[in-house]
Amino acid sequence: MSSYFIALIDIHDPQRYEQYLAGFDEVFENYNGEVIAVEDNPRILEGNWPAGRTVVIKFPDDSELRKWYDSDEYQTLAERRKEASIANIAIITGMDE
């Protein structure tokens, strides 16, 4: 089953966050994922949205997602994100047919 990486991110240091983004594609291209959406201004239908940026990335399964997220390459890069923002991140299992 497909797995989705969902991140709700509040960026407090945009310049440092840009350093994270500058290295993201180079690391990400080595893994079997697809960035589905990145939104800084979601259109809220109900309630309050708890973040400034929302990111959705699709992977074929949990194993592929964890290979990317747990990799030394990504964890090194993620330190820049952590210095520049606060993120709430979850894995959501898809409803594949």
Image (spheres, helix red, strand yellow):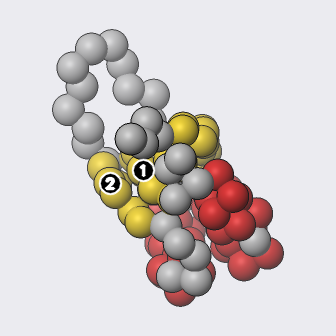
Marks 2/1 in contact by CB < 8 Å: the verdict is yes
Q: Position of residue 76 (x, y in %)?
A: 75, 73
- Per the rendering, the mark at residue 37 is 2
For this orientation, the residue located farthest to the right is 72
Amino acid type of the residue that numbered disc 1 sits on in the rendered structure: Val
10 Å crowding of disc 2: few (<14), some (14-19), many (20+): few
CA–CA distance between discs 2 and 1? 5 Å
Q: Which residue lies at the image location 26% right of the left edge and 42% below the top edge?
A: 41
> Where, by quadrant of the figure, is residue 44 drawn?
top left
For this orientation, the residue located farthest to the top is 47
Q: Position of residue 62 (x, y in %)?
A: 64, 52
> Where, by quadrant of the figure, is residue 19 drawn?
bottom right
Up-down: is 44 above or below 28? above
Q: Position of residue 86 (x, y in %)?
A: 61, 45
> Where, by quadrant of the figure, is residue 34 drawn?
bottom left
Q: Position of residue 59 (x, y in %)?
A: 51, 59
Up-down: is 12 above or below 32? above
Residue under label 1, please give it: 56
